Amino acid sequence: MLKAVLIDDELIALKELKLQLENSGKIQVIESFANPLEGFLNLSVLKPDVVFLDIDMPEVSGIYLAEQIMITYPEIRIIFVTAFDQYAINAFELNAVDYILKPVTLDRIKKAVSKLEEKIAQRIESDFYSLSNQYEESVKKFFIHEQDNIILLSIKDIYYIEAENKTVRIRTKNRKYSSNHPINYYHRKLKDLNFFQAHRGYLVNLDKVSAIIPKINYSFDIKLADIDDIVPVSRARIKLLKQLLEI
């Protein structure tokens, strides 16, 4: 029997999903979590075969969380539980991603579990990275890995993101965090969240901009509120920046 962990911020949905999975006779639910970070942190101990994962959660998107699970625990399978529309369902099927539509039914769960068993037997992998790229979804918080700890970093606390050699650094008011993701990854994830690509190597939170400082040769710098850091603006981007800031 396959061991499962459930992650969904709605307690009623968790209870219903657990009941239906247990009624299928093929899944043992070993734990349920309403907090996505807590669920993620417990995967190393619980070692499930599959995670049933809600997509629409207030702190962390299920698609983003699925990425983090695949990076850290590539052996764990994921089945999304979603109320998304047909456009999203087509994307799941295109990328061989398993899903169950809400409200869940026993018949739909049996089909998903049967498909899961087949994929495990044939070693078929789901392409979560292509799915995430296809959605170009905006995230609310990022997982930052520091040794054995994981920090859930809120988007509103980010001042700017800088590509420095082969490392990306995320600047908050009090410190910098390092990331192995390229800056284009963050550009995609921060889509429509008021971040501006001031330069090829910089993404700036426009909510943190306090001034635009002119320099020689018609170039400019961005001054940020509450910190001393200066971010350069490329000549090609200054006109758009002024328009966005309504200067």
Image: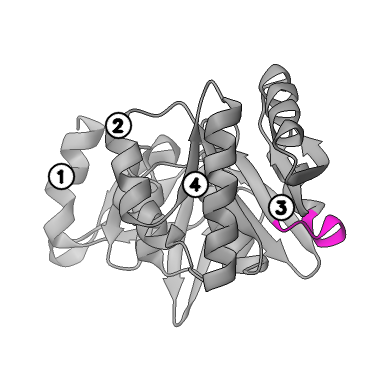
Q: Which of marks 2 and 4 is in front?
A: 2
* SS category of the residue bearing label 1: helix
Q: Mark 2 points at which residue?
A: 86
Q: Residues within 10 Å of mark 1 (few under 14, many from 20)?
A: few
Q: Where is residue 35 in the image (x, y as percent from the top left)?
A: 73, 35
- Residue in the image at 76% along x and 35% along y: 22
Inspect the magenta stretch and tell me whether residue 45 lies in it. Answer: yes
Which numbered disc, 1 or 3, marks the residue that appears first in the sequence? 3
Residue 246 position by quadrant: top left
Q: What residue type is labelled 2?
A: Gln
Kindly indicate the quadrant of the structure image that contains residue 24.
top right
Q: Which label lies toward us, 1 or 2? A: 2
At a point 40% along the width and 53% down the height, the residue shown is: 132
Closer mark to the observer between disc 1 and disc 4: 4
Q: Which circle's residue, 2 or 3, is located before the other in the chain?
A: 2
Dot in front, 2 or 3: 2
Rendered position, 182 above or below 193: below
Secondary structure beneath dot 2 equals helix
- The answer to whether marks 3 and 4 mark residues whose Cβ atoms lie closer than 8 Å is no
Query: Which of the two discs, 3 and 4, labels the residue nearer the N terminus?
Result: 4
Q: Distance between the residues labelled 3 and 4?
A: 18 Å
Residue, disc 1: 240
**Distance from the alpha carbon under mark 1 to that under mark 3:** 33 Å
Would you identify the image quadrant in which residue 180 lies?
bottom right
Residues 100 and 80: in front is 100
Residue type at tag 1: Leu
Report which residue position mark 3 lands on. 151
Check the picture and name the quadrant holding the C terminus.
Answer: top left
Q: Considering depth in this image, is 154 or 60 the residue closer to the camera? A: 60
Label 3 secondary element = strand
Stretch of the chain drawn in magenta: 43-49
